[in-house]
Amino acid sequence: MIAFFIKRLVTALLVVLTVSAMTFSMTFLTGDPAIAVAGENATQADIVRIREYYGYDRPIPVQFMSWLGRAAQGDFGQSLYLNQPVSIEIFARLKTTMTLGLSALIFALVLAIPLGVVAAIRPNSLLDRFALTVAVVGQAMPSFWFALTMMLWFGINWRILPVSGTDTWAHFVMPSIALGYFITPGVMRLTRAGMLEVLRSDYIRTARAKGASGFSILFKHALRNAIIPVVSLAAVQFGFMLGGSIVIETIFAVNGLGFLAWESIQRADLPMMQAIVLVLSVFYIMLTFLADVLNAWLDPRIRIS
Amino acid sequence: MADPVLSIRNLTVGLPVKLDRKNAVTGISFDVRPREILCVVGESGSGKSITSLATMGLLSPGLKVTSGSIDFDGRDVLKLSNKERNAMRGDQMAMIFQEPMTALNPAYTVGAQIEEVFRIHRNLSAADRRAEVMRLLEEVRLPDPKRLYDAFPHQLSGGQRQRIMIAMALALDPKLLIADEPTTALDVTTQAQILVLLKQLNERHDAGIMFITHDFGVVAEIADRVVVMRHGEIVEQGTADEVLNNPQHPYTRALIDAVPRPMTEETTPEANENPVVIDVQGLNKTFTTSTGMFKPSRTVTAVNNVSFQVKRGETLGIVGESGSGKTTLVRCLMRLIEPDSGAINISGVDFAAKSRSELRSHRKDIQIVFQDPYGSLNPRRTIGSQLIQGAINFGIPRKEAWDRVYKLLDIVRMPHDSVNRFPSQFSGGQRQRLCIARALVVQPKVLIADEAVSALDVSIQREVLHLLNDIRDRLGLTVIFITHDLRVAAQICNEVLVMQYGSVVERGGVSQIFNAPSHDYTKALLSAQPGQNWDMPVFDEGDTLAKI
């Protein structure tokens, strides 16, 4: 287990290094970064001064190492637009995004996994059809439309939930459902497919021959084996929700990272963009790593070769 | 005589519609008494497994008991509620299955899985449960129970896993133990050990054992009484002595007739003046598996300095248990995997030295038939398109290729209209004939049969073996026949190589191997054959199975 853990950790760190190199190279996407920073009406002297000030005149590997060193300490430089350190803004927004992402993930898993299990017990039954309907609707319905509909009923007509902002937990209910519902179908169908396959397997028959109860067969013997691919999917989906929730964040005025990324692209705020890409990538890698570790715990064949 | 622990009366299990017969099992009646081993024998599709699953209440949802009763310990199990049945299963009646590799849950330690039986049915402290599991692990003769307790199924061999299953089944001293082909998936030496273990346990426990098998050798080894089933009906039942030595029903006689005979007569192989077709010299293959970044990698020698020659028109048998390297040897021979060193000369072409692209035009010279006739045909393409494919690949014009296909269908005795049908419309034996035809369509010089009859019933096995011999003689083929079963090798081979741990431990003519084995491993393999003390009666009714 420890060897497996270290191996995965080293791999993850190597991926982080690769991603950071790619992120760093964003600086040079538009050619000379000094010209881009200086703006249209700058003189040659301005450009030279900016180049020296930001250190763009040093060799690229040296620039990369110093950028990476500072990034590792949480220093991503100054925002070109906000005139404050990038990190302050990012960490403020990250908290909101994490809250939203986590609650959306929990909503999705709590809905999707039991639905998938129930659907697999009796394939093609009424319950299975119901679960399938939930999945198809989730897949087909645009999330902005679903969000607006919820807002209309729960926020405006019935006045149960606040429609925008991030002040209390109640503010997160609707955005979490809107965001989480979007990933429910995939998780549900993967759980169902996995359960269907596992329930047909020989060791489930062994468990029944032992006299194990239906509950124990479903949750102890079957789900643990069926859930393994779901863990990997959920990790990827969670990463997606952290970065790709721009639509939901905009509708509910949740000032998260996704929204900040969209703003920064508009403002051509390069250091901010770099930092967001790097932070989200590192999150993605961490999630994948955690999913691997969780799967190794679930499946001894992975951890003991 | 003790009262039966299990009485099945007029049991009928219906099949879902659209199948070739109405019932899986029709009106069968038999008893299992305490301390006896009752063998239920039959070929695939005879309904023997369905009977055992119905007794356990484990029938798949499509199958329903339509009439009859299964009285166990004074109660009709068919009338029990789910809860009552769960309380009974694993406690008073237990079951061992055919496939030990998949019968255990991969996510839990084997100790925990045995312990679960106590957890479900008894109120014991954790320490007592553990002690009971240790006692069981010792009873089924597993080495080092303390370490095995915490092992996961994938770390154990097939034989060890089957012992775990037996321990689990015996945990609460059940009154009835059902064993559904428990040794079929095991090597012959492991099978012998498991059979000995079951016999010993039978002496110590009161359980009646219902032992399902297709192998009359196994029946002769352990049965007290025998039930013979065919097409869902019982054709004959009686004591082991009656059924084995004086069978009344023609089907039983035909089944016993189809059992491969042990070699007794001395035959000297005829001198073969034909040229050598396969010449293998000093073939080696090792596999290196890395177990982690910080551990040294493990090296397994799968093929160790193997040399042999086969002349045209001969059949060479390669016999060995799982892991002996016989399949790796053949894969190297075909260059499906790369050998580490050695020379392979097949009818004058140096297979080992050629590059992959040079080899392509020679690949047709050596063709293979695999073990599983169900998995080796594409279910979504017609037989015709699968048969013709090989010939087309090697540039034969379409018309000529079809001519070849029809000729081959005659040779393997399949009707010409097979070409328009799909694999699912054929039985296992028919599919294996089609696989043979597919291999022959490119007119190979060498045909390899990799456990090609192992998945077939004995009666069909015999037909396919005859067919292979017939084809070899008619087409002048050279055949390599891989098998784990010495009895089968004896029926078809001229010469036999016995492999163990990647090396050839013995080589010789069939009668020499059988009557005067020199290596200890060959002797062990021979003595592990089930049913040695049974003097098989000879009925000489020809291919009666085909007629009845």
Image: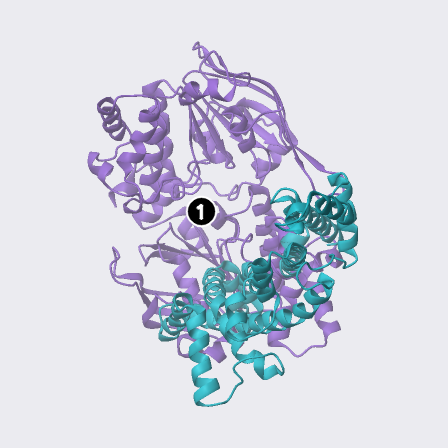
Residue A166 percent coordinates (x, y): 61, 79
Q: Quadrant of residue B445?
A: top left
Q: Nearer the viewer, residue A197 or B303?
A: A197
Q: Position of residue B67 (x, y in %)?
A: 31, 72
Give the vertical position of A135 relative to A31 (above or below). Answer: below
Identify the residue at horizontal 56%, vertical 59% (top origin): A266
Residue at the spot x=69%, y=40% of the render?
Answer: B290
Pick out the residue farthest to the left.
Answer: B417
Drawn side of residue B319 relative to residue B373, left or right: right
Q: Which chain is purple?
A: B
Total number of numbered labels? 1
Q: Chain of mark 1?
A: B
Quarter holding residue A258: bottom right
Between B427 and A255, which is closer to the camera in this rendering?
A255
Q: Is residue B270 visible?
A: yes
Residue that label 1 marks: B216
Q: Is residue B340 above or below residue B76?
A: above
- Please say which color scheme the image uses: by chain
Q: Tell me, what hue is chain A?
A: cyan
Q: Position of residue A22 (x, y in %)?
A: 65, 46
| Quarter occupied by residue B366 | top left
Which structural element holds mark 1? helix
Q: Can see residue B172?
A: no
Q: Residue at x 48, y 35 (%)?
A: B487
Q: Residues within 10 Å of mark 1 (few under 14, many from 20)?
A: many
